[in-house]
Image (tube, rainbow, N blue to C red):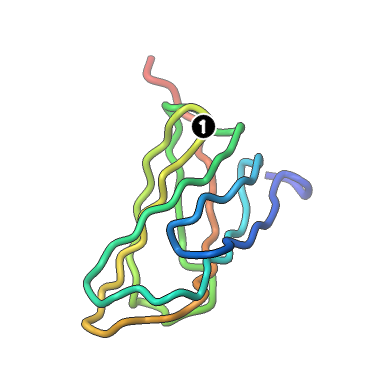
Amino acid sequence: YTTGAGGTVVQATSKSTTVILNTVTGIITMNGAALAGDTTVAFTLTDSAVAATDAVLVLHESGGTIGAYSFGSTAAAGSVVISVHNNTAASLSEAVVLRFVVIKSVNA
């Protein structure tokens, strides 16, 4: 992607709060609320650039303990559900910074 294709957004209120960013790539700074050990939270990224057939890659960019989290994503038309799992036994209260990239795809 070229400069201008991305954007940034900060998640308000909690780790399950929806964020809106209509770009094919970007940075999401998650809320710093506690996430219990061995627990998964999911939130929606509302994004008009996403089609249901796309793959969305989510990476741990910075903030928080590297390696303490795993990530998943499920695309739909105009949105992505992003899941974040705390892989540790301890509760973590970190504002994890995620990078996402939409990989355009089709079924046929």
Place of residue 88 in the rendered image (x, y in percent of width and height, measured from the top left): 25, 80
Q: Quadrant of the N terminus?
A: top right
Residue tagged 1:
104
Q: Nearer the viewer, residue 25 or 30?
A: 30
- Tell me what residue is drawn at x 57 percent, y 61 percent: 11
Above or below, 28 relative to 61:
above
Residue found at the far bottom of this picture: 90
Q: Amino acid at mark 1?
A: Lys
Q: Is residue 102 above or below residue 36?
A: above
Quadrant of the rendered structure where residue 93 is? bottom left
Q: Position of residue 104 (x, y in %)?
A: 51, 32
Quadrant (top left/top right/bottom left/bottom right) for the C terminus: top left
The single residue placed furthest to the top in the displayed view is: 108
Using residue 73 as the reference point, say whether residue 11 is left or right of it.
right
Whether 3 is drawn above or below 13: the answer is above
In this view, 33 is above or below 22: below
Crowding near pointer 1: few (<14 within 10 Å), some, many (20+)? some
Q: Secondary structure at mark 1?
A: loop
**Residue at the spot 70% in from the left edge and 52% down from the top edge:** 7
Q: Report x, y in % for residue 85.
A: 30, 65
Whole-percent x, y for residue 87 in the image? 26, 73
